[in-house]
Image: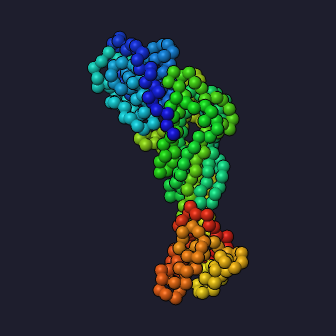
Amino acid sequence: MKYSLVLFLFVSFCCLDSVSAQQTNGEFRRGDCLVDGHIDMADAVHLIDFLFNSTGPLDCPDACDANDDAVHDVGDLIVIVNSVTGFATLPAPGTTCGFDPTDDALFCDVPCDPPIDPVTSPDHSIEVSLENDQGTSVTMAVTMDTPDPLLAFTFGICHDSNQLSVLSVTEAIDFSQNLPDFSEVTLLSDGVTVAVLMSALNALLFPAGSGLELFDIEYQVDPLNPATSSICPCDILGPGVPLPLQLVSQTGTSILPSAICYDPIIVDPAFFTRGDCNGDGGFNVADAVYLLGYLFVSPTVLPCEDASDINDDGGLDISDPVNFLAYLFAGGAPPAVPNQISGCGADPTTNDPLGCDGGTCP
């Protein structure tokens, strides 16, 4: 799910003048157009306004020369967006205060102060909530509340990689109905990052609203590692630098939304022993007879379907009692784990339709 920066290139043919007046060459952070100590989508929005909407001079022209070519143009915009999403590295001095190593006509005569952190807004939020629980997988809905139309937004969704892994991310209705010029969704071992810039000209807005449905994220649950885990909006993930938890309003204001977690996900897998088909705790010919009766004589109830799936192929058929009888009387291979040898355990195959409601394990 990626809307390429190629969409920005159509404006690269515009004739854009560089700043030419030489002034005091002070310290700055590359890409920090707003001079607030952060390099984020608010800087991209600010540069777009400067390039195409005649918003006046830049406070620190050197900072907005993101690719250090002594010209302000769409190339700087692309570098800022790619650096925010973690797919580009800013030229020196990078994200820390420093002097321009390039002798050019650009300057910066404002202080390179410590970062200014916004206060969390109680009126804006990114929320994770449970949409569907399939047992070995769960689908979470990512929604947003914002009273302000937005030019851009970024966030991460964090999870415990020992408990969960992302299977898929799909666009939900409100996002799919308001597609941006650029979006980047990145799947990581411990979460998902989302970066959105609505328009290369600040001409599109993501609408204000409550409970706006952005994405559905499906997670695989590890049944062999039962525990409690939370899924939270966050600002600690990224393929390069961490992606901020940020909304950028129509006026270019950076907003820190409240993060609302889904807490907890409780993983409680069924434990059983494969081969105990009749649920009496034993492993003998009675189990094979019981399974044959289920398959061919009468619709008896299996206490635990997984326990009767002797070969763990995800189905119940004649091969299961045949394999079990071969194990009991002809030196055949034992049932797939968890079996009488390994002891009680959860099904390592999590994507089959079989379940276990009545295993004899504690």
Quarter-of-image position of residue 142: top right
Residue at horizontal 53 percent and vertical 52 percent from the top: 167
Report whether 41 appears left or right of 227. Answer: left
Question: Vertical placement of 348 versus 50: above or below?
Answer: below
Tally the numbered discs: 0
Camera-side residue of 241 and 52 = 52
Camera-side residue of 299 and 266 = 299
Report whether 83 appears left or right of 255. Answer: left
Q: Residue furthest top?
A: 21
Q: How is the model colour-coded?
A: rainbow
Camera-side residue of 113 and 95 = 95
Residue at horizontal 57 percent and vertical 34 percent from the top: 256
Camera-side residue of 160 and 295 = 295
Q: Residue furthest bottom?
A: 329
Which percent across, then down, holds residue 134? 64, 57
Residue at horizontal 60 percent and vertical 36 percent from the top: 176
Question: Vertical placement of 133 versus 156: above or below?
Answer: below
Residue at horizontal 59 percent and vertical 86 percent from the top: 284
Which percent across, then down, holds residue 289? 63, 84
Q: Is residue 272 visible?
A: no
**In which quadrant is the C terminus drawn?**
bottom right
Quarter-of-image position of residue 324: bottom right
Report whether 8 appears left or right of 318. Answer: left
Quarter-of-image position of residue 255: top right
Which percent across, then down, holds residue 24? 34, 16
Q: Is residue 105 visible?
A: yes
Which percent across, then down, holds residue 350? 56, 63
